[in-house]
Amino acid sequence: MDGLAVGPNAGSCGTAAYLREEVTLTDIQNDVRWAAYRELALPFGLRACWSVPILNAAGEAIGTFAFYYRECRGPTELEREIVRKCVHLCVIALERHERVMERERRASTNALTGLGNRAAFDAALAELDCDLPEQWAMLTTDLDNLKTVNDTFGHQAGDSLVRTAGARIAAATAPDSTFRIGGDEFGVLL
């Protein structure tokens, strides 16, 4: 169920994330909030669900912590205490994960174009299977006379040219991966 949209009738977890408050559904079979999803839960014997949103420092839902039950019931006081203690740890872990992912994204993304950079290009090349011929191809291109554009019209114009060229190459070769692998050089893995 990963990736489903949150909303007022999105099961227990999607509703808890949407409302940013805990949701106790004691009867999945008959609760309208589970109408679109009950066939995913009932065959596994899941009859009730209690979900608590995991909120970041800005109050945004970044996840949920849920207990599923095989009988129609809500949480016990012990379960509530466990979740109170675990949610804080979940926030720490999820926010750390987001920071790590952002650092990795920045390390592999060209800041000017938003395309993958040379490190991302090299990593993508290393993952390609070279055992079977004709499974992939590489296209490289560069912008002639970029230095002349920079010298004549300024670096803003040169940056604009690089951004526009990168966007057009990426659009023309989508869904394949486009990279800015040098100052005026682009690569595409087809």
Image: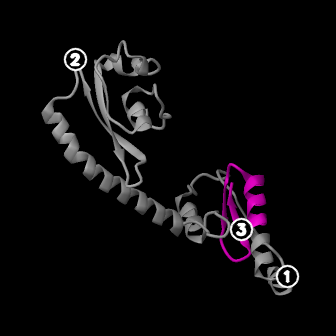
The residue wearing badge 2 is 71
Task: Report the residue at 60% width, 65% height from top.
Answer: 121
Look at the numbered disc 2 and give the secondary structure of its residue. Answer: loop
Placement of 63 over or under 14, stated as above or below:
below
Q: CA distance from mark 1 to mark 3?
A: 22 Å
Region in magenta? 163-190
**Residue type at tag 2:** Glu
* Nearer-N-terminus badge (3/2): 2
**In screen coordinates, is 181 left or right of 37?**
right
Task: Report the residue at 66% width, 70% height from top.
Answer: 112
Callout 1 crowding tier (Cα within 10 Å): few <14, some 14–19, many ≥20 = few
Disc ID at residue 153? 1
Residue 84, image quadrant:
top left
Of discs 1 and 3, which sits in the foreground?
1
Of discs 3 and 2, which sits in the foreground?
2
Placement of 33 over or under 156, stated as above or below:
above
